[in-house]
């Protein structure tokens, strides 16, 4: 297969960090090439160099056989290279047609927009990947999976030769992931190369023709998927063997910490009953729209239930606000940590201590800086958060460490019940294992945990019981130790 891109001996350093160390990398025309590695291994830096956002300190770049002195963003797009990042960079207040056609319309210039031409451009792009979207729909109102397709269609309005997808499935439900992988294969069928970055090993093996593994700024291997399995790929990424652990609930007669009876909220969920015991991790899974996150929001007082009963330690509680939930000993780690869980521009210290500032007051009623810093350092150590200084903005951390900061923030409040909604979404394999280990440790110390996930294998390995929601109701309950991921998936997708 003919080569499209070659990088030779690429070095890139930032202050105190050697991000890429003499990296060689090749990409063939019409190839689906997966790029994997832990957060901070150099993947994002490589993507930014290919896309012209960053310039290498040294090394050689060759595109379609021609050496390139330097790549800027405009020059990269002119060569047919485009990147779709996790944030998609769409205009939420514009329509599907406007978002797809905007780059081509802008390039043509002129003061008057030909709206028929805008729609023609959008339809032509959609036809290339065989999707049919509502051209007049406002993008900000669309599900994330549909927005992803809009971003791909926008890239297709140019002479696209290489599409780089950076964690494209991190926030997608299972059905949308399958659609996206199908689109990726369609792109390949049209001769377009795809560089696909993901932490999800099953997706990598599903689409990759070659897999390149990065570790600590170096390319350690490029191999076809038939020469790899999950264990070997993890070992290449981390330099370690990942031990497989299964959660074991020690005391089935432990006291009930949370009891929910007949909880309902119109158009979201109905007649939900469940219980959590001290030291137990209970899984909750279901398709997007099944009501699982809406249930979590009700239990935490963000969007209270309209009827039903909640008991904590055997006593009835009214949860009408977040303050009520916190007072009852409930903590909630949301799936969307960037929007709901963290203040990204604030420091790690400020985020970790945000829930307990009233406990850190000094004699004059002001927050004691020394106590605040000590508490932050305590949780940074306890959760193994990798940060050079608690004063750095949380946005500078990797995804896995950001998730640990969210967990630390709520654990600092000493909850009895911890609700985790997608706690490992978008984090690498070792960060995921670390989060699972820590949650098991919390359960061992008597905390009751509700783990919401759309990964069936995660539920099977890390919970005692699995509750399955469909159409706003808990339809099934199975013992995790006796279940297989495929069985859970079948129940999740069963008719309601």
Image (tube, rainbow, N blue to C red):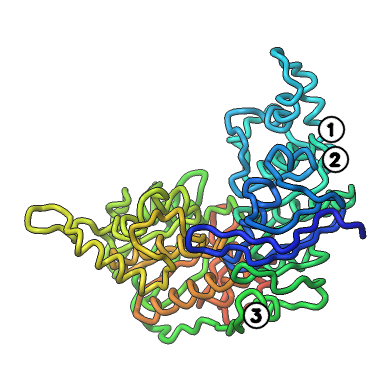
* Closer-to-camera residue (375/355): 375
Residue 203 picture quarter: bottom right
* Local crowd size for mark 1, using a 10 Å CA cut-off: few (<14), some (14–19), many (≥20): some
Q: Please name the residue shown 33% across and 58% down the image.
A: 391
Q: Furthest-bottom residue in view?
A: 250
Tell me, yes or no, whether the two marked residues, 1 and 2, touch with CB atoms within 8 Å: yes
Residue at image point 80% right, 28% down: 121
**Residue 168 seen:** no
Considering the image in quadrants, where does the C terminus appear? Answer: bottom right
Going 43% across and 75% down the picture, which residue do you hit? 438
Q: Is residue 48 left or right of residue 392?
A: right
How far apart, in angstroms, are the residues tagged by discs 3 and 1?
Answer: 44 Å
Q: Where is mark 3, residue-wise?
A: 235
State the separation of the CA atoms marked 3 and 2.
38 Å
Q: Is residue 148 left or right of residue 121?
A: left
Closer-to-camera residue (249/223):
223
The residue pinned by badge 2 equals 128
User: Label 1 belongs to which residue?
Assistant: 124
Callout 2 crowding tier (Cα within 10 Å): few <14, some 14–19, many ≥20: some
Disc 2 is placed on an element classified as helix
Task: Say if 114 sits above or below 34 in the image.
Answer: above
């Amino acid at each position: 297969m003919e080569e499209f891109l070659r990088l030779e001996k690429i070095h890139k350093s930032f202050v105190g960090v050697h991000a890429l160390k003499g990296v060689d990398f090749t990409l063939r025309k019409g190839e689906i090439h997966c790029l994997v590695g832990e957060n901070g291994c150099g993947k994002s830096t490589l993507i930014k160099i290919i896309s012209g956002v960053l310039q290498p300190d040294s090394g050689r770049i060759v595109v379609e056989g021609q050496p390139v002195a330097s790549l800027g963003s405009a020059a990269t797009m002119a060569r047919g290279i485009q990147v779709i990042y996790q944030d998609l960079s769409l205009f939420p207040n514009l329509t599907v047609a406007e978002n797809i056609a905007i780059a081509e319309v802008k390039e043509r210039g002129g003061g008057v927009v030909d709206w028929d031409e805008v729609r023609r451009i959008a339809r032509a792009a959609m036809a290339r990947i065989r999707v049919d979207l509502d051209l007049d729909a406002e993008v900000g109102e669309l599900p994330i999976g549909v927005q992803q397709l809009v971003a791909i269609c926008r890239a297709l309005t140019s002479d696209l030769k290489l599409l780089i997808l950076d964690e494209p499935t991190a926030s997608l439900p299972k059905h949308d992931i399958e659609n996206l992988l199908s689109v990726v294969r369609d792109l390949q069928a049209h001769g377009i190369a795809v560089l696909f970055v993901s932490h999800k090993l099953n997706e990598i093996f599903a689409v990759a023709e070659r897999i390149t593994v990065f570790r600590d700024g170096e390319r350690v291997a490029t191999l076809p998927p038939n020469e790899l399995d999950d264990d070997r790929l993890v070992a290449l990424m981390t330099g370690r063997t990942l031990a497989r652990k299964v959660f074991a609930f020690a005391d089935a007669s432990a006291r009930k910490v949370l009891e929910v009876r007949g909880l309902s909220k119109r158009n979201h969920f109905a007649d939900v009953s469940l219980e959590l015991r001290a030291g137990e991790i209970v899984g909750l899974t279901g398709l997007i729209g099944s009501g699982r996150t809406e249930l979590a929001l009700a239990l935490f007082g963000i969007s209270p239930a309209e009827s039903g009963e909640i008991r904590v330690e055997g006593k009835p509680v009214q949860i009408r606000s977040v303050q009520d939930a916190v007072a009852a000993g409930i903590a909630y780690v949301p799936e969307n940590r960037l929007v709901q869980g963290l203040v990204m521009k604030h420091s790690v210290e400020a985020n970790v201590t945000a829930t307990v500032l009233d406990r850190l007051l000094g004699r004059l009623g002001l927050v004691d800086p020394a106590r605040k810093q000590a508490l932050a350092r305590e949780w940074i150590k306890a959760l193994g958060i990798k940060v050079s200084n608690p004063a750095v903005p949380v946005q500078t951390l990797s995804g896995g460490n950001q998730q640990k900061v969210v967990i630390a923030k709520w654990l600092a409040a000493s909850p009895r019940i911890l609700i985790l909604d997608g706690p490992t979404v978008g984090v690498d394999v070792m960060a995921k294992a670390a989060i699972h280990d820590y949650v098991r440790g919390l359960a061992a110390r008597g905390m009751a945990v509700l783990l919401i996930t759309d990964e069936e294998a995660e539920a099977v390995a890390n919970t005692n019981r699995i509750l399955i929601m469909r159409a706003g109701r808990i339809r099934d309950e199975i013992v995790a130790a006796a279940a297989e991921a495929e069985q859970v998936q079948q129940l999740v997708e069963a008719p309601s």
